[in-house]
Each structure stands twice: as C-alpha cells, then as structure tokens.
Amino acid sequence: TGPTSVPNLSSVIQLAALGPATMLCDSSIYLTLFIAMATTNKLARAFAREDVDDQITTLSHVMGVSLSVGTLITVLIFFRGHGLLSSIVGPTGATVLVESAKGAKEVVDLTPEVLRAALGYSRIRSAVFPLAVMGLTAQSALLCVQDTKTPALAVMVASVVNIFGDYLFVAKMKWGVRGAALATSLASVLSNGILIRKSWKIMNGWKSDSQDTKNFALEEETDQSALKDQALGRKTTRFVSFPDRRSLVSLLKLAGPMFFVLIGKTMGYSAMTIRTGYFGMVSLACHNVLMRIFFFYCTFGDGLSHAAQTFLPGLLYRKSLQQDKVTKVEYASKTATSQPSGESSITGDDKNARTFLKRLLLLSFVVGCVNSNTARFIANHAGRAFTNDASLVSLMSHVSPLMGLALLIHPVTMTLEGSIIAGRDLQFLVGTYVASIAVLMVKLKFFCFDFAAVWKALVLFQLVRIFQFGGRVWRRTASSKMQLRKTAGAESSGNSG
C-alpha cells in the first residue's frame, strides 16, 4: 500500500521529519550557547572592574569564536547531516501501521521520505548558522549593558517574519518542511542582523570612551609613547577578531565546563527523541509537538538564568574586593576604626546578592506556575492546531501533565543554575550534570517501556537538578550568613573589650 492511500499521512510525515530535523538544528545552536554564557560572565566582570579595554577585547574575541563555530556546524550538517539524522530517527522511528484497500493492516517504513524531508530542512536552517551564533553572542553583550529593547525588537521581527513566511511558503506555496525552514532562516537573518549591528555600535562607543580616557591620561603622563600605542591598539581593534593563545586559554577555562553542561543537556534531549523513535512514528510526531511547546516555555527559564548570570557577578565581585580590603586592613592595622567600614560593605554586598537571588527565585516560581498551566492548556485544547490526526491529539492530552510538571520545575532550576555559573562554581556544575545525565540515561535505557515513560524520565532529570542546585546554593548561603555572624560577634566582643 502506498503512503498516498492513507488519509493525513503526508502531514504526519512532515511532523515526523520536523522532529529529528529541528532537534539537530536546535541542538547544534544550543551547544553554542557556551560562548554566549562565557561572554556574559566575562563582560559582567569587566563592567564591575570598569575596564573598557577588556570589554572591547572580550567582545571582539567572542565574535570571532562565534563565527568560526557557526561555520563549522554548517559544514558538518551539510556533509554529515544524513548520518546524524538517521541516528536520531532510529530503526523504527519512521514506521506506521496502515490499512490497505482490502482491510488488511501492514507496517510501512517511511524512513527514506522522513530523512529526505528532514535533511532538506536541516541544510536550509544551517546555512545561516554563522550569523545565528554571532547573534546569540551579541544578544548576551546587549543584555550585559542592560539593552533589552534591541533583543525585544529582534524577537518581534523574527516572530512576524516567521509567521508570514510560514503562511507564504507552507500554506500558500505548499513547500512543506523546506518552506518552514526557509521562513525560520529569513527570520534568523533579520533578527540576528539587528543584534549584531547594535553590538557593533556599542563597541564603537566603548572605543570612543577608551580613547577619551587615554587622551586625558596622555596629558598627565610624561611617558606618552606607551599610552599612545595602547590607545591606537584599542582604536583599531576589529569587531570580529580571533583571540591569541593566552586569551583563548582564558576563554576556554570558563567556556569549557559550560560546553560540557550543554553537551549533557543535548545528550539528554536527544536520548529522549531516540527512545521515542522505538515507539513508532505517531509517538515521534507527538513528541516533536510537545517538545516544541516545552522548548518555547523553556525560554522564560533561560531568561531568568541569564539575569542571574548578568547581575550576580558584579555583586559577587564587589564583595570579593571588599573582603580583600578587609584582609589587608587586618594585617596592616588592628585599630577599631578601620574594621567596621569594610565589614559593613561586605555585609551590604552579601545582602544585596542574597536579596536579588531570593526575588529571582520567587519570580521563577510564579513563571513556572504560569508556564505549566498554559502549556497544558495548549496541549489539551489546541492539539488540532498542530495536526488533524486523532491519535496524535489523544496522545498529547495523555502526556501533557508530565510536560506541565517539567515546566513547573524548570524556571527555578535554571535560576539556581545561573547563580552557580555567576559564582564560577563550575566544578560542582559539571559534577551535577554527570550525575543527572547518568540518572536520565539509566531511566531511558532500562525503565522506559512506553512513550509516557520518556517524559517521566524528563521530570526525574529536572528533580535531580533542582535538588542538587538548591542544596548547593542553600549551603553556600548558610555558610555566608554564619561567617557574617561570626565576624559581627568578634567585632562586638572587640568593641566591648
């Protein structure tokens, strides 16, 4: 029996192709977030130090790294995309049970059709990956300077262009998944172009500030040649440049653990899709729809994590500076007048950091509740907006409570993760993901007997992370409070004596 004899089969093929294709493309872009995360951390520290030269150098280097990584991914998908997609689809992920004209049921393997559509989608999307990776890095830089209007404008432009493109290329021209890929790529070009152009303008502003500072210093210094050379070097720094060996090592020390974390997450989500492929094409198509909903709402949690990574490093850096000052004062002098000022500064900075984190966690809980309920509503009542297949709609409603529970936990988990990254507690972060990914893989491999169990594994993955992150943050916060109380008690005893 040919596939055209089955009603709605072509739409199921398109949805099934979108599953592995979007997972390959989105996972590839997601893996490059380690550059954006490192950018956030390094720029936040540079802002706290008020080091304009470091800001310029950091942005230029990460843009060069972003361009290189994006180009490498494009080449990889163009020439190795078929093999990667085949491993994602799995041996039975593109099979469907159909009824022939005589009433007999048989299993039809649609793997070639699904892979062909998925590969076309992936190649179109990957063509703009160099620009997309640079756009993610540019967005991190803009958020560090508290420019939220430009990213919001970029998101709005991307949404409008994507919706219009889907209507034109998919609904009108009937180009299927290739039309969807073209619409997404056009949206990516325009939105990321906006972000990159704004970052270029900001970098030029930093160069002007650096030049003005150098000119002022030239008037005060007698040895002007070195300062002139330094000013000229900063002025001629390109927007896109590649770091030297020392700068690259410094970047890798920060970005390496983050890349490992992203690899762990991607492995987990990929393993979910691969395991779903063993339960048939209907389950794979349903998984694709639910994952699209899940990842859409995950952006809210990622935003909260980015907020923690942006604002906490400055507070923690100022706290460490005050601690260094107090240490120097303790060794240099034992007078009672110099000690309280430093301790008061530490207390203030520590309270500011803890207060900010508490408010962010409260906001995360509220966001999680809203995300969970709205996502479940979409899956339960708007399933036919994604497909007309009754079995898909029924399966979406059955699994939606698990998706809602995972989304309830996600924002708080990401906020805690962001605070750990801000404190550069990277060794613990890597250890946490080794444990949580191991739990997820064991669950998927040995205790996953139906499609719903795949999403139960995701809920377990979220629970393992939130308990580990929460315990770490609580212990560090409790330790900080105890240290401040001991310091206050020692100071009070010294004053009374």
Image (cartoon, helix red, strand yellow):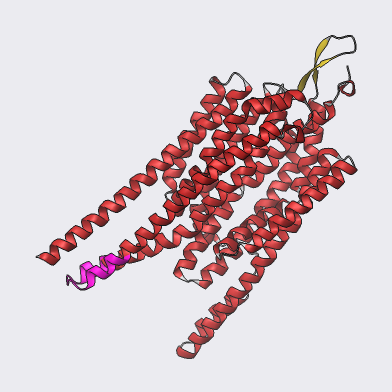
Give the residue displayed 53% in from the left and 38% down from the top. Answer: 408
Magenta stretch: includes residue 380: no
- Percent across and percent down for residue 67 are 67, 56
Q: Is residue 222 visible?
A: no
**Which quarter of the figure has residue 339?**
bottom left
Is 233 displayed left or right of 169 in the figure?
left
312 lies left or right of 200 = left
In the figure, 425 relative to 468: above or below? below
Magenta stretch, overall SS? helix
In the displayed structure, 418 sits above or below 108; it is below
What residue is at 82 percent from the left and 49 percent from the top?
A: 165
Query: Residue 268 appears at what percent x and percent y?
Result: 57, 34
What residue lies at 62% left-to-right and 70% top-to-bottom? 202
Residues 219 and 139: in front is: 139
Residue at 54%, 28% in the rendered image:
457
The image quarter in which residue 475 lies: top left
What's drawn in magenta, residue-wise? Answer: 327-345
Q: Residue 266 at x, y = what percent? A: 59, 38
Q: How many marks?
A: 0
| Residue 102 visible in the picture | yes
Residue 374 placement, left or right of 388:
left
Where is the C terminus found, in terms of image quarters? bottom left
User: Looking at the rendering, in which quadrant would you find the N terminus?
Assistant: top right
Dividing the picture into quarters, in which one does residue 496 lie? bottom left
In the rendered image, residue 443, in percent from the top left (x then y), is placed at 53, 25
